[in-house]
Amino acid sequence: MNAVTHSQTPASSRGSVALALGAAMATGQPYWPVEDPSSYANNQADETPAYVINQTVPTYSEVTDKVLAETKNPHLTFVDQMASIYASFSERQELLGEEFGAAIFDDLDSLYES
Amino acid sequence: MTFSPENLKDQIPYYLTSALAQKELVENLEAIMGGARSGYYLSASQDAYAHERLQGDGWRGLPLFSFTSGEKQDVRGILLSNTCDVSPENDRTLPPQLVFAPIVRLSAIEARFVARGISPAQVDGKVAAIKQQIATSVFYLPAGGPLEEDYVALLDDVHSVPVSAHENDNKEKLFTLSMAGFYLFVFKLSVHFCRLQENVDRSPAM
């Protein structure tokens, strides 16, 4: 179930603050809004209550679906490719072999180069 | 920890988060694993790390003490140490150590195979396997840049010296692995040194 919650500041409160700020700017006085308990009680009646929208019917959007899929795991393809390459590489590995190893390591020092 | 796509996802560095960089790495990695001889190294003109020590670098002047002769000599080798562990920019309480494996000419070990009496067909097959990076203890380094011919790193011949010992007159960088070359190198190290599928049951004997 999708739930969209909105809360709104009452328009009357916003208007009061804007007016007070405007007045303070006009008089050159700094203003800091202080809550008035009595006005709060009055504003409660004007305030639009928070509401919840219950969306019972799912919506579908190809665009949203694609964006969400890429956002959830943007590296999925790359990761799968790298894991596949590593697995393939790992599975193909074989030992050098005793005879070949001995041919190299019997006189290793002479193979070194400065 | 097992190797899985989910684990790998957490290891993707910031410079590989763009789709283009990822595509390029996958393509280059598949190409060199398929036998391409180019794409292992950064070209000299594009090498921003020409004077820095990075994991997978080729260097001259790496000091090595021979277990056979007891003598010290400077050799060509490839760095196995993690880049961060040898960076002079990182603070540390203990002197940093360089872990490296000498690199030797592929033609020289091929000649050894022949001299030992191994059949030409077997020698050809082994050299082909080395070039395809199939031999687990050998990392193939195709000719390119300052490498005048094909070399191999012998991953069973590993040495460790103080970084300060590499500050000598013979010190010279030979190559810096490309992104794909580096990933292949790390793949090789992980397969050779960190084989979780070792087929040894370590459960306490009953």
Image: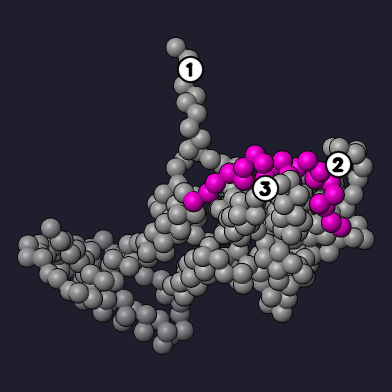
Circle 3 is placed at which residue position?
B118
Q: Which secondary structure lies at badge 3?
A: loop
In this rendered view, identify the residue nearer to me: A43 or B106. B106
Tell which tag, 3 or 2, sits nearer the viewer: 3
Q: Are marks 1 and 3 in contact (CB under 8 Å)?
A: no
**Above or below: residue B130 compared with residue B26:** above
Rounded to the nearest angstrom, the CA distance separating label 2 from label 1 is 39 Å
**Above or below: residue A27 compared with residue B63:** below
Q: Are marks 1 and 3 on the same chain?
A: yes
Circle 2 is placed at which residue position?
B66
Report the chain holding disc 2: B
Could you tell me if residue B53 is visible in this image? no
Q: Are marks 2 and 1 on the same chain?
A: yes
- Image coordinates of residue B170 in percent, x first then y, are 90, 60
Q: Which secondary structure lies at badge 1?
A: loop
- Direction bottom: furthest residue: A26
Bounds of the magenta segment: A92-114
Identified by mark 2, the residue type is Ser
State the residue at coordinates (23%, 72%): A64
- Image coordinates of residue B184 in percent, x first then y, are 57, 58
